[in-house]
Image (tube, helix red, strand yellow):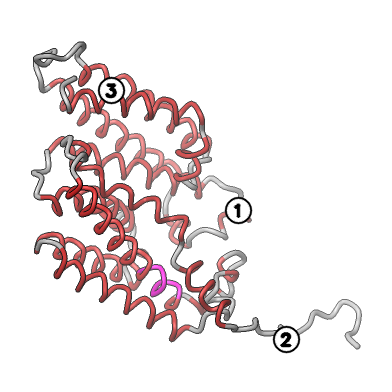
Amino acid sequence: MDKPGVARQWQRPPRRTGWALVGGLVRTARPRQWVKNVLVVAAPAAAGQLVSWHSATRLALVFALFTASASAVYLVNDARDAAADRAHPVKRRRPVAAGLVPVPLAYAAGTLLGLGAAVASAVLCNPMTAVLLIAYLAMQVAYCVRLKHVLVVDLAVVTTGFLMRAMIGGVALGIPLSRWFLITTGFGALFMVAAKRYSEAVQPEGARGATRALLTQYTTGYLRFVWQLAAGVAVLGYCLWALESGGVADGALLPWRQLSMVAFILAVLRYAVFADRGAAGAPEDVVLRDRPLAVIGLVWAAMYGMAVTDL
């Protein structure tokens, strides 16, 4: 019988049934993060080329390949960090750290997914799509091994990952990528990444320990500066795109390109409210759960759609 006040020194290992292993692997692959890969439709949508069956099937393939690649990186990352995660108040619940998924199995599953996605992209897509996907995998593995511990570089790598997602759909369909698209998407991604880091950094000390060690090397003032600067450049890039045309296109009812600036700026300002409060730690929750932001997003999408189709 245990003595009062003395903690147990052992813990029953989790049961490793077949279904538990599968569930643990799926959880490690981060299904909630798969929504980010919808960005693969960004470039075709910007070019107004989403209506053909060929485009839809090719984008569905690219989405699946990018999802497999991202999941492979999560599996390798959790396998590599398993020992450190076990001492973490929150990350110790991850399937690999908790012992539900063996470290060798996580490495093997991640390697197979990554290699499979790279080979499939080379066989089923054009060469540039394969190059971009392989570059993404190499960059993310480097991030897991070293780059996530380097100030500023960690922000750049995560931002570049989002930019690659937005680029790969256009590359797969052979669509030229506009400089304004790249500027707006890149700095928009940096805005959200820096706002996420800022939100994590301003949490109470107890909660900060549940995020990432590199935050202790950033100051909140610096992270605020980064997300404010990135938001400004993203808005400027979008406005320059919108103002590039002289006015109302032939056959269009209104100058939708110029009018869409209003919705875009409102969306950035609305998201900035959450960033300023330190509540943008989960961007997908902000985007999906805030009703005013969702309405603004739908209005912007409608205006943008009419702009690129000249309605």
Residue topped by disc 3: 303
What residue do we see at 31% from left, 60% from top? 64
Quadrant location of residue 62? bottom left
* Start-end of magenta stretch: 73-78
10 Å crowding of disc 2: few (<14), some (14-19), many (20+): few
Q: Position of residue 191 (x, y in %)?
A: 34, 40
Give the distance between the C-alpha atoms of the residues marked 1 and 3, in whole angstroms: 43 Å
Please identify the quadrant where the N terminus is shown: bottom right
What residue do we see at 48% from left, 34% from top? 276
Quadrant location of residue 270? top left
- In the rendered image, residue 149 lying in the magenta stretch gets the answer no
Q: Report helix, strand or loop for mark 2.
A: loop
Q: In the depicted view, which residue is nearer to us: 5 or 310? A: 310
The disc label shown at residue 205, or none: 1
Q: Position of residue 238 (x, y in %)?
A: 22, 29
Q: Position of residue 133 (x, y in %)?
A: 21, 63
Residue flagged by tag 2: what amino acid is it? Answer: Trp
Give the distance between the C-alpha atoms of the residues marked 2 and 3, in whole angstroms: 60 Å
Q: In the depicted view, which residue is nearer to us: 167 or 197? A: 167
Q: Is residue 259 left or right of residue 208?
A: left
Which comes sooner in the sequence, label 2 or label 1?
2
